[in-house]
Amino acid sequence: MTSMPLASIFRRPEAGSLVGLLMVVAFFVVTGGVEFLYLSSVGSWLSRAANLGIIAIPVGLLMISGELDLSVGSMITAGSMITALVSGFYGLPIIVGIMAALGFGILVGMLNGYLVVRTHVPSFIVTLGTLFAVAGLLLGLNIVLTGTTTVTLMAPELAKTLFGKYFGQGFQVLIIWWIVITAAFVFFVHYSPYGNWIFAIGGDKVSARNSGIPTERMTILLFVLSAVSAAFVGMSQAILFQAVQATPQMTLIFNTIIAVVVGGVLLTGGFGSVIGIFFGTITFAVVTQGIYYTSFDQTWSNLIIGVLLLGAVLMNNTFRKMALTYAPKKK
């Protein structure tokens, strides 16, 4: 039985992100103590990772295809606000609020994708526009309809159990959704023809189109997946917290991109993996939560977080370059 060459292992996009994750965990175990690995602690950073990870995977696939979606910062608020308005303020069944939120995600995703493929304006500009347009729409409609910027929601127990509860020692139920969604995307990207299409589009869109790949439809689909995923997380947060404010989550945009890049996705497109994004998201969550288990002065927390995340990215990049330049010895 022959073992997989070392270069083949390190060449995989998730290899560097896994090593970076292990090093970051080791750092906080040493500096913060074993309490960092208690179930309650693990539940804390896994719950944070789940909320980010559900959005990071489709955003990462967009980046692999050479596109970017900044509108997720408003879409997560849209998912929360629409759910709260429909099922909280107007008192309709929670399933109606959920479907309305996800339906709005489909519309915005289709709009983003259509504008990108038809106008050929960079997706950065298109989604930056929809980011502010959706944010303004939500704020304006919310004030017109309710007279305030905050909407409350009292979801039924079943909805809380499915989308907005904690179980065990601080594990949010969204973790289960995150794992299931990740598994579905692993199959979609790595075990179906559609994954090859995504990588081909990111490598050379013109060549991909000439080879018969429906580049425009695939791009629109990826934008829809990104917007719906953000709306899904927003809907879950509305059910969990039972109160929503019409404020876009701007930091979520940068957090998502950081998690994706830490996960091994190249900003230039054409390279990455779902598992790598999964590990990158956990790494980001560990770094942002782990700092509170240490004795470091919180004044320096952002500096430490930045250094650790940069180190994880450089580790990932180093592993990839080593693999690409590795040549096995001839026997």
Image (tube, helix red, strand yellow):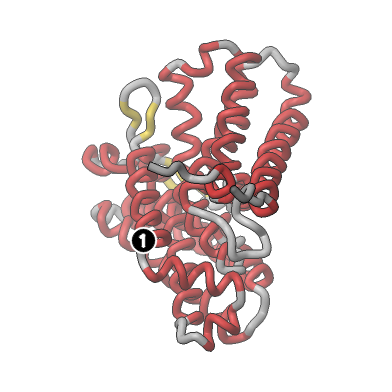
Task: Give the answer, above or below, for where 95 lies relative to 242.
Answer: below
Q: Which residue is drawn at the image coordinates 50% and 74% (left, top)?
A: 219
In terms of image quadrants, where is residue 228? bottom left
Side (left or right) of 92 relative to 145? left
Query: How far from the left and from the top, in percent, is residue 239?
Result: 36, 43
**Dot 1 amino acid type:** Tyr
Q: Is residue 185 above or below residue 322?
A: below
Q: In which quarter of the image is residue 221?
A: bottom left
Q: Please, is residue 117 above or below residue 181 in the view?
A: below
Q: Can residue 108 be seen in this view?
A: no
Which residue occupies the foreground of this view, 295 or 250? 295
Q: Which residue occupies the extreme front position in the image?
A: 331
Q: Name the residue under label 1.
A: 191
The residue drawn where x is 44% and y is 66% is 195
| Residue in view at x 70 percent, y 44 percent | 318
Q: Is 305 in front, or is 194? A: 194
Q: What residue lies at 33% left-to-right and 34% top-to-bottom?
A: 165
Q: Which corner quadrant holds the N terminus?
A: top left
Instruction: Pick whichever, 179 or 319, lies toward us.
Output: 319
- Residue 218: where, in percent of width, then height? 46, 75
Helix, strand or loop under label 1: loop
Place of residue 246 in the rendered image (x, y in percent of width and height, measured from the top left): 54, 52
From the viewer's perspective, tell me whether residue 302 is left or right of residue 269.
right
